[in-house]
Image: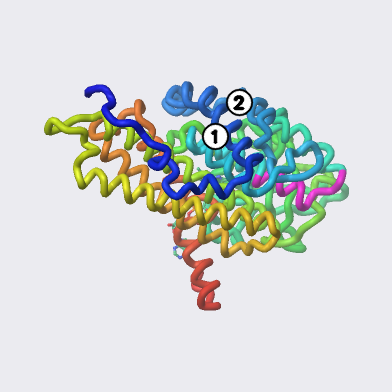
């Protein structure tokens, strides 16, 4: 390989000047998270990924950075806008989807469940410590036999005197083996309810799912609940039914719409830099028309995805965003991001299959991202229902 012969211009990075759509304060948040990723994630991610290790020690640092429960207000939460939250997720995922997933599970799923549906006492007890990254939470909805259709969950909770007793299994639950508290969604006589279950409760077991081929710097577990007894005050009082967990999933899906673009941008930048310095047939491979077409296609989709994200974020901040509009961004941006990462990998040739380059790691991570928080198919069905008014789920 020879030395770089061409510069990467600002236009190559932000072709349409999408940055002009952000306020100075929003760009400051982005810069802060980007610097953190450069200093703390990029130098270490290969080792974490290879060892399949989630760096637990980063939780407090991410708390200090202000990205845990970022868009929630009060109770020690940062109270930032939806757009700032999105920009932060994008930068984190440019480092690795696993780290963005941590922020999503902690903030968008678990903290938002407590924030939306918890009692004052529950909010005071858990949210400040979780915002600081001192306490870790997980969100247990999916089960071995209930994934895309969470209305089929079997985990049950029954009242026995002053206690709720929970029995069942959960699968794919992020962070469960290191969490202090689990939000467990369970079936009761009144319908699906949420419970705050300390992971130290007798009968609660979390077993890490491994080995995984993607999302390796991130923990997912199978949870078993065997006659787990929690006090009556463990019930989240604010919601009954599936709309509770679905409201939290919407928060996470919104963040993913932005996050996936971070993985895409990082892969594109890696491929562009490589294409400019790698010579074959006595020329930089960036000079070939076929290479330029690949790079142009990446830029088109990254920039379009960003416009979708900004517009969706502005609507969220205005309080006018509808859940089916989040499906547009999640479906489109993750689908395009995985295609970009894979295409970026081709430009790196053989070197692209090593951990020295980021695109294949990002692509492998995005296999999980396109599956969780609603698969491509589920978001297609949500959009199909919104367009036709006909549900086609079953
Ligand atoms: C890395 C990772 C982290 C996760 N973290 C969490 C977490 O923290 N908490 C949590 O509760 N869950 C979590 N999940 C679970 C995740 O939400 C589920 O994996 C997801 O909902 C899909 O469920 P499933 O894997 O059971 O697949 P299934 O629902 O079995 O789907 C299998 C395939 O069938 C398709 N399919 C299903 N129904 C239809 C239909 N009606 N029409 C067409 N196609 C259909 C799906 O799209 C998919 O392609 C996580 C998953 C992963 C991989």
Residue at 57 percent across and 42 percent down: it is: 87
Q: What is the magenta segment's predominant secondary structure?
A: helix
**Residue 219 visible in image:** no
Boundaries of the magenta span: 108-120
The disc label shown at residue 134, or none? none
Name which residue lies at 63% across and 64% down: 322
Residue at left 26%, top 38%? 347
- What is the crowding at mark 1: few (fewer than 14 residues within 10 Å), some, or many (at least 20)? many
Q: In terms of image quadrants, where is residue 223? A: top right
Q: Position of residue 385 (x, y in %)?
A: 53, 72
Does the rendering let one see residue 382? Answer: yes
What residue did someone put label 2 on?
Answer: 58
- Is residue 149 shown above or below 4? below
Q: Could you tell whether 348 is left or right of 324 in the image?
A: left
Quarter residue 89 falls in: top right
Instruction: Of the two numbered discs 2 and 1 on the same chain, state the one appearing first in sequence.
Output: 2
Which residue position holds label 1?
99
> Element type at marker 1?
helix
Respond yes or no on whether mark 2 lies under 8 Å from ligand 1: no
**Residue sitting nearer the eye, 363 or 348:** 348
In this rendering, the answer to whether 183 lies above or below 33 is below
Q: Quadrant of the N terminus?
A: top left
Q: Position of residue 381 (x, y in %)?
A: 49, 67
Task: Verify CB contact (< 8 Å) between mark 2 and mark 1.
Answer: yes
How is the protein colored in the picture?
Answer: rainbow
Q: Secondary structure at mark 2?
A: helix
Q: Is residue 41 above or below residue 108?
A: above
State the separation of the CA atoms marked 2 and 1: 9 Å
Q: Residues within 10 Å of mark 2 (few under 14, many from 20)?
A: some
Q: Is residue 56 magenta?
A: no
Estimate the x, y position of residue 10 in percent, counting from the top left.
42, 38
Q: Residue furthest bottom?
A: 389
């Amino acid at each position: 390989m020879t030395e770089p012969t061409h510069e990467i211009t600002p236009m190559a990075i932000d072709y349409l000047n999408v940055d002009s759509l952000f306020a100075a304060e929003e760009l400051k948040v982005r810069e802060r998270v980007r610097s953190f990723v450069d200093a703390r994630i990029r130098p270490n991610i290969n080792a974490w990924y290879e060892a399949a290790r989630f760096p637990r020690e980063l939780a407090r640092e991410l708390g200090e950075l202000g990205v845990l429960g970022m868009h929630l207000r009060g109770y020690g939460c940062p109270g930032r806008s939806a757009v700032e939250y999105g920009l932060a997720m994008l930068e984190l995922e440019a480092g690795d989807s696993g780290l963005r997933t941590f922020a999503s599970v902690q903030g968008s799923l678990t903290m938002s469940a407590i924030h939306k549906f918890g009692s004052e006492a529950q909010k005071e007890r858990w949210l400040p410590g979780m915002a600081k990254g001192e306490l870790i939470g997980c969100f247990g909805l999916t089960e071995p036999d209930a994934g895309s259709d969470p209305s089929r969950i079997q985990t049950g909770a029954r009242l026995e005197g002053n206690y709720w007793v929970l029995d069942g299994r959960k699968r794919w639950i992020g962070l469960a083996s290191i969490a202090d508290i689990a939000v467990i969604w369970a079936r009761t006589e009144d319908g699906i309810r949420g419970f705050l279950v300390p992971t130290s409760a007798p009968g609660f077991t979390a077993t890490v799912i491994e080995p995984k081929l993607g999302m390796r710097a991130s923990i997912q577990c199978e949870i078993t609940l065997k006659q787990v007894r929690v006090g009556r005050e463990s019930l989240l009082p604010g919601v009954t039914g599936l709309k509770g967990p679905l409201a939290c999933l919407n928060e996470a899906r919104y963040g993913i719409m932005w996050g996936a673009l971070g993985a895409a941008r990082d892969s594109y930048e890696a491929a562009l830099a490589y294409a400019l310095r790698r010579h074959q047939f006595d020329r930089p491979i960036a000079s070939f028309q076929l290479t330029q077409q690949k790079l142009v296609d990446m830029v088109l989709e990254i920039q379009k995805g960003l416009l979708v994200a900004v517009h969706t974020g502005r609507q969220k901040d205005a309080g006018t965003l509808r859940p089916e509009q989040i499906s547009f961004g999640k479906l489109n941006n993750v689908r395009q991001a995985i295609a970009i990462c894979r295409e970026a990998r081709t430009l790196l040739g053989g070197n692209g299959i090593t951990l020295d380059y980021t695109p294949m790691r990002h692509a492998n991570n995005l296999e999980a991202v396109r599956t969780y928080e609603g698969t491509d198919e589920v978001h297609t069905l949500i959009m199909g229902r919104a367009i036709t008014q006909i549900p086609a789920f079953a």
